[in-house]
C-alpha cells in the first residue's frame, strides 16, 4: 500500500465494514478477459456469501476459474480542498482475494439466504424447495484482504 497511514489494520474495523455494507463487486477472469459484477452479499465473520441463478455469465466464469477478487466500499462524501486536484473521497474499502465454493446443500443455503434477506427487511421468509433448487449460494473462502480508509 502506497500510503501506509491509510491502511486499516484493526480487524474490528474491517469486520464492521463487511457487516455494514450490502454490495460487493467481484472480479473474475477467463483467458485474460476480466469480468466485474456487483452482488448483494453477507459476511459471517470468516467468509463472504452471495446468491445467484444457477446459470449466467458469472457462474460459467466461476466454474472455469474459481479464483476471484472482491471489493466492498463505503463512500462517505467528499473531502474538499482549495485546490481541485486535492479533492478526495471520504471512504472505507476492503479488497481481497479468494476462491469461490458452490454450496449445494439446501439446509446450508437457508440460513445464508435468511441473512441476505435480513439485510433488507425485518420480514421472515420460507424458501420452497423449488426456489432453493433454482438458487445457487456461493461462499468466498478468503485468501487475503486489506482495508484502506480516508477522511474518517
Image (tube, rainbow, N blue to C red):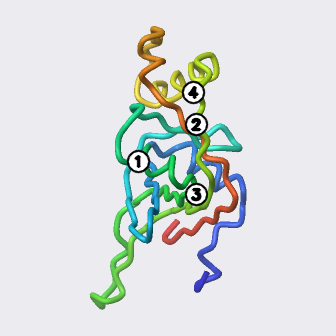
Q: Earlier in the sequence, mark 2 or mark 4?
A: 2
Q: Is residue 81 above or below residue 12?
A: below
| Relative horizontal placement of residue 149, taking residue 47 as reference (left or right) | left
Q: Earlier in the sequence, mark 2 or mark 3?
A: 3
Circles 2 and 1 in contact, beta carbons < 8 Å: no
Looking at the picture, how far across and down is residue 82, in whole percent?
30, 88
Residue 112 image label: 4
Residue 102 image label: 2
Residue 96 visible? The answer is: yes
| Element on which disc 3 rests | strand
The Cα atoms of the two marked residues, 4 and 3, are separated by 21 Å
The Cα atoms of the two marked residues, 4 and 1, are separated by 19 Å
- Report the residue marked by disc 1: 58
- Report the residue marked by disc 3: 67
Instruction: Report the front residue among 101 and 75.
Output: 101
Of circles 2 and 4, the one toward us is 2
Q: Earlier in the sequence, mark 1 or mark 3?
A: 1
Q: Earlier in the sequence, mark 2 or mark 1?
A: 1
Instruction: Report the front residue among 11 and 37.
Output: 37
**Disc 2: CA contacts within 10 A as few (<14), some (14-19) or many (>=20):** some
Q: Is residue 56 above or below residue 129?
A: below
| Relative horizontal placement of residue 29, taking residue 146 as reference (left or right) | left
Of circles 4 and 1, the one toward us is 1
Residue 126 visible? The answer is: no
Q: Residue at the location (27% across, 87% down)?
A: 84
The Cα atoms of the two marked residues, 2 and 3, are separated by 12 Å
The Cα atoms of the two marked residues, 1 and 3, are separated by 12 Å
Amino acid at each position: 500500500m502506497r500510503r501506509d497511514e491509510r491502511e486499516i489494520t484493526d480487524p474490528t474495523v474491517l469486520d464492521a465494514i463487511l457487516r455494514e455494507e450490502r454490495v460487493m463487486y467481484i472480479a473474475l477472469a477467463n483467458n485474460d478477459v476480466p469480468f466485474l459484477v456487483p452482488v448483494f452479499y453477507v459476511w459471517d465473520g470468516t467468509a463472504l456469501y452471495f446468491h445467484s441463478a444457477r446459470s449466467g455469465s458469472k457462474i460459467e466464469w466461476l466454474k472455469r476459474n474459481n479464483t476471484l477478487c472482491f471489493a466492498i466500499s463505503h463512500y462517505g462524501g467528499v473531502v474538499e480542498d482549495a485546490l481541485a486536484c486535492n479533492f478526495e473521497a471520504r471512504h472505507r474499502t476492503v479488497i481481497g482475494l479468494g476462491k469461490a465454493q458452490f454450496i449445494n446443500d439446501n439446509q446450508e443455503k437457508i440460513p445464508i439466504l435468511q441473512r441476505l434477506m435480513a439485510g433488507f427487511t425485518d420480514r421472515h421468509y420460507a424458501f420452497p424447495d423449488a426456489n432453493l433448487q433454482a438458487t445457487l449460494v456461493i461462499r468466498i473462502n478468503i485468501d487475503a484482504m486489506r482495508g484502506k480508509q480516508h477522511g474518517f
